[in-house]
Image: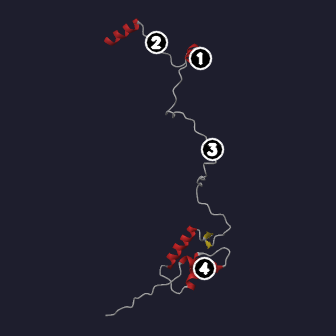
Amino acid sequence: MFEMATEQHPISLPPYPQMIMAAIEASNDANGCNKTAIAKHIESTQSILPPSHSTLLNYHLNQMKQSGQIVMVKNNYMKPDPHAPPKRGRGRPPKPQGDSSHVAIPAPSVSPPRTRGRPPKVNDSSSEAKSKVSPSVSGTPRGRPPKKAKKESEKVKEATSVSA
């Protein structure tokens, strides 16, 4: 029957990072160039491109941006400035891991670990005597007064009312 000639010649393209850098250098714009300008430059210089060209371009642009080969400013890609300080990540920077040989760290005082909760009251006999001697300014002791003890006559009345 019919045999289709589906032999595909391997596409020999330069690596995408190399094509992207060539496109950025060719733009000669101080603000860099955006993704569509890079794609148009690659399409104009390369005759045969794979069908997944836009996906590959996005992938390599993101990879180069993450690695620091290119910088994205206002939706434009450009080469990083060699004299610019390195860009810091988000969050609090880690503490420097310096030599501990030149810094003298004071030895912690050796004491038993503290117990949980509120510390117990110190039983001081002089403080108890003071509280019993001087009840308060008004002369009456603090708090609710204790119940009065029942007298014999009240106990008899209560017993007769319960049995009746």
Which quadrant of the figure contains the N terminus?
bottom left
Q: Label 2, secondary structure: give it.
A: loop
Q: Nearer the viewer, residue 41 or 79?
A: 79
Front tag of 2 and 1: 1
Which disc is residue 148 wearing? Answer: 2
> Is 133 situated left or right of 50 in this image?
right
Query: Type of residue at label 1?
Result: Ser
Q: Which residue is mark 1?
A: 136
Distance, label 3 to label 4, CA atoms, is: 55 Å
> Could you tell me if residue 36 is visible in this image?
no
Q: Which residue is mark 3?
A: 104
Residue lying farthest bottom? 1
Q: Nearer the viewer, residue 144 or 81?
A: 81
- Marks 1 and 3: in contact by CB < 8 Å? no
Q: Looking at the image, which residue is at 60% across and 75% down?
A: 34
The crowd level at tag 3 (other Cα within 10 Å; few <14, some 14-19, many 20+) is: few
> Is 13 situated left or right of 27 in this image?
left
Q: Which residue is mark 4?
A: 23
Residue 66 position in % (x across, y down) = 56, 67
- Marks 2 and 3: in contact by CB < 8 Å? no
